[in-house]
Structures are given as structure tokens and as C-alpha cells.
Amino acid sequence: MLSNNVKEQDLNPWPGLTLACVRILHLYTKVFGQDLQQIARKNCNKCKCVREGHEVVVEHGARSRLGLANNHDGLDARSLGYAFVPAGLTSARQVDQYYSTLPTHEVPKLGSKGEIARLQRIAKQLPKQDLALSACKFIEESVKSSFQDFISARNEIALDIGIAKPAPPNSVCDGCNRSIITQQVSVVAPRMGKLIWHPACFRCTTCDDLLVDLAYCVYEDKIYCERHYAELLKPRCEGCDEVS
């Protein structure tokens, strides 16, 4: 929501910006030096972008999109030059160590391709229509109750956010089965017990994509993005992209 002192026209001097996709929006913010998160706009319209580039993400990350409380005890990502910093890190040195293990194009530095990739992953891996009944436009009345049960059960037993932490001695990555150097910044998933991953190995079992903002779901002792977790349990319509 815009503050009382900021008018939408101040943020959108070009009227077409309210219809812009993520790619165009990124170019605009880079050229005019505006904050990507403060641009007030609607979803893009009548463009040729793929779905994950088409949806404009205005939440401040996966945690907000999932309706989870923000971690106010963590580092301020933007002051460090990043769009996202995992919970559990306590210093800029740890943040740099964490991101040094990822390919450059995957690092969500402000104003970079990595920031755009993160926004696209949020839209792709955490589809709004999976997260709340109110976001579904085509769900039939007869399945609304079971869909709500699915949401409640998923949130209770499967969905969570990973945490970054230094690896204890003799750690082995659950993703690649290779050793992790003691004290190297790694990822743990609270719902997966003592298992630990290299940051680059914390990926969806189905699509093998990095799990955005470390958001994951557990199914039969494996980790998934929410999209593919949902598809293990419910069919997804290829037209409207809703599960039922």
C-alpha cells in the first residue's frame, strides 16, 4: 500500500508502467533509479512474456507471499545490496560466503539479473492460486472444501522456510552427497531434521530449480517447491494453472 505522501502518479510517470512486465519494469527502475518494490502497478497485459515473467510480484519475498511473519531479527538485505538474505546469517561476511557458492546470475543483488530471476521464481514456485482460495478464479464450488483442507494440511505438515547456518563437523550434503567444509555456510530445513545442503544444492526434487528464498515443502522425505508439491497431490489445469 502506498503511503499518504506518495501518489501513484509520482511512482508511475509513464502510464504504461502499470501494465509493464518484470523485464520492462527492471529496465525502467535501472534507468530512472527507482525502487523496484515501490512501483505501484497491475499485472502486465497483452505481452509475450512467459508466465513467471508476466506476473508482477509486489511482496517482499516468499515469506510475505506465504503469509508468514517477517523475521525482524535478521540482517537488512537491502542495506547489504541484496534483495534477499537467508535467515540465520549474522554478518555481511557470512552473506558474502553464502552467495559466493552460487553462480553469479543466481545471486539476487539489487538491480541485477539475479534479482529478476528471484522474482520469476517467486511467481513460478509459489503460485498465488495455490496459496489461498481467494486467489482462485475457476475452482468449482464442489471442491472448495477439499482445496481448503489441502491448504491447511500443507501449511501444517509440509511448508516451511530453510535457514542458513555454518556446517558442523563431518557434514554431508543431502543433495550431492559430498562433504561440506566445517563452518561453511549451508542450508538446513527444519522439517527435515538434521539434514544439511550446500546452498547450490537446495533444490526442488521435481524441477531441480533453486528453492526461492529457501521456501520448501516436504513430501515423503524429499523437498519440493510449492508448485510441484501441490502437483504430487492434485491435478493442475494447463489453462488456468489452478489445482483442484
Image (cartoon, rainbow, N blue to C red):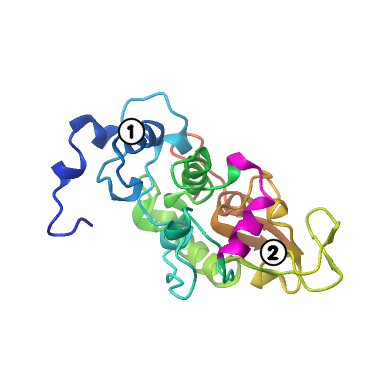
Circle 2 Cα neighbour tier, 10 Å, few/some/many (<14 / 14–19 / ≥20):
many
Q: Residue at x 53, y 60 (%)?
A: 85
Closest to the observer, 12 or 244: 12
On screen, residue 121 versus residue 180, left or right, reads: left
Name above or below for residue 40 compared with residue 60: above
Q: Residue at x 64, y 45 (%)?
A: 209
Q: Residue at x 29, y 36 (%)?
A: 32
- The answer to whether mark 2 and mark 1 are in CB contact below 8 A is no
Q: Amino acid at mark 1?
A: Val
Q: Residue at x 27, y 45 (%)?
A: 39
Closest to the observer, 209 or 88: 88
| CA distance separating discs 2 and 1 | 35 Å
Closest to the observer, 154 or 23: 23
- Point out residue 229 in the picture as x, y percentages from the top left corner: 61, 54
Q: Which residue is mark 1?
A: 31
SS for dot 2: strand
Range drawn in magenta = 92-105
Q: Amino acid at mark 2?
A: Val
Mark 2 and mark 1 lie on one chain; the one further toward the N terminus is 1
Figure quadrant of the N terminus: bottom left
Q: Quadrant of residue 216?
A: bottom right
The secondary structure making up most of the magenta span is helix
Tag shown at residue 167: none
- Point out residue 156 in the picture as x, y percentages from the top left corner: 55, 72
Q: Which residue is mark 2?
A: 185
- Point out residue 162 in the picture as x, y percentages from the top left corner: 61, 65
Name above or below for residue 42 compared with residue 159: above
On screen, residue 74 versus residue 56, left or right, reads: right
- Does the magenta-highlighted stretch encompass residue 95? yes
On screen, residue 69 versus residue 99, left or right, reads: left
- Does the magenta-highlighted stretch encompass residue 169? no
